[in-house]
Image (cartoon, rainbow, N blue to C red):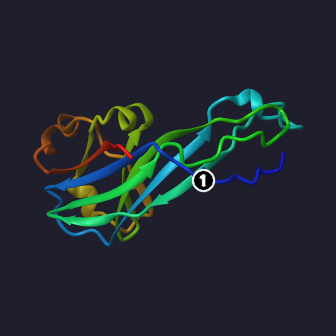
Amino acid sequence: MKQPDIKLNPNPRMRYEITIEVNGAPGPFDRVEGVVDYRVANEACVPMTPVTGATVPPEKRVPITLTPAGDGTYKGEVFADLLQDEDYFGKGVCHWSVVAASANLFVKSVDFSAPLFRDDLLKGKATTRYYSNRSYATTHLDRVDVGEDDRAKYQDEANATFSITVRSEEKRQ
């Protein structure tokens, strides 16, 4: 199956401000990036792949420009309707949906990843992930650290953690 020519919506209206707050990190980050992932929500518009017979909905990852806002806080903007709904395969209009907006904070080869999934993003609900200070200090292994949703899961090391909170706020046009 050929990858469709995915177009941007010429007039997106569903705008959200994304705020990322880092609390208690044991040191600085080499870089802070953001991405938003989209996926076609209605698989009936996508043909089956010839070999497996599975339907593989198109996906697209778009970077989020994050701006430092002081004191471990970064802000960016996403549009839930950034991609153009279109009949890409001659099987009806494919409708794009946000999967998640994610903050990715890097220390050497470690990516501390904190996602804000679709429902929370659209409802303006914040999510917080906790990360071990030991993980921050162990940067020689190339890896993604997704942390924990509860600091207590670190048991004896619960006080030796830091957090990344990601939240959204709808911005009316």
Residue depicted at x 76% and y 32%: 45
Residue 149 located left or right of residue 143: left
The one of 51 and 61 positioned closer to us in this rendering: 61
Q: Is residue 129 above or below residue 92?
A: below
Q: For the residue labelled by badge 1, is the local secondary structure a helix, a strand or a loop?
A: loop
Q: For the view shown, which residue lies furthest in the right direction?
A: 50
Label 1, on which residue?
10
Residue ID at (77%, 51%):
3
Residue nearest the observer in this picture, 15 or 153? 15
Residue in view at x 55 percent, y 50 percent: 11
Image coordinates for residue 84, horizontal then vertical, percent? 64, 46
Q: Position of residue 165 (x, y in %)?
A: 25, 46
Kind of residue at disc 1: Pro
Give the percent coordinates (x, y) of residue 47.
Answer: 82, 34
- Residue at horizontal 75%, vertical 54%? 5
Q: Quadrant of residue 90?
A: top right
Total numbered badges shown on the rendered structure: 1
* Residue 127 shown left or right of residue 15 in the figure: left
Q: Quadrant of the N terminus?
A: top right
Front residue (pair 159, 122): 122
Q: Residue furthest front?
A: 173
Q: Nearer the viewer, residue 28 or 79?
A: 79
Crowding around mark 1 (Cα neighbors within 10 Å: few <14, some 14 to 19, many 20+) is: few
Q: Is residue 30 left or right of residue 101?
A: left
Q: Would residue 93 appear left or right of 83 to someone viewing this image?
A: right
* Furthest residue in direction left, as rendered: 159
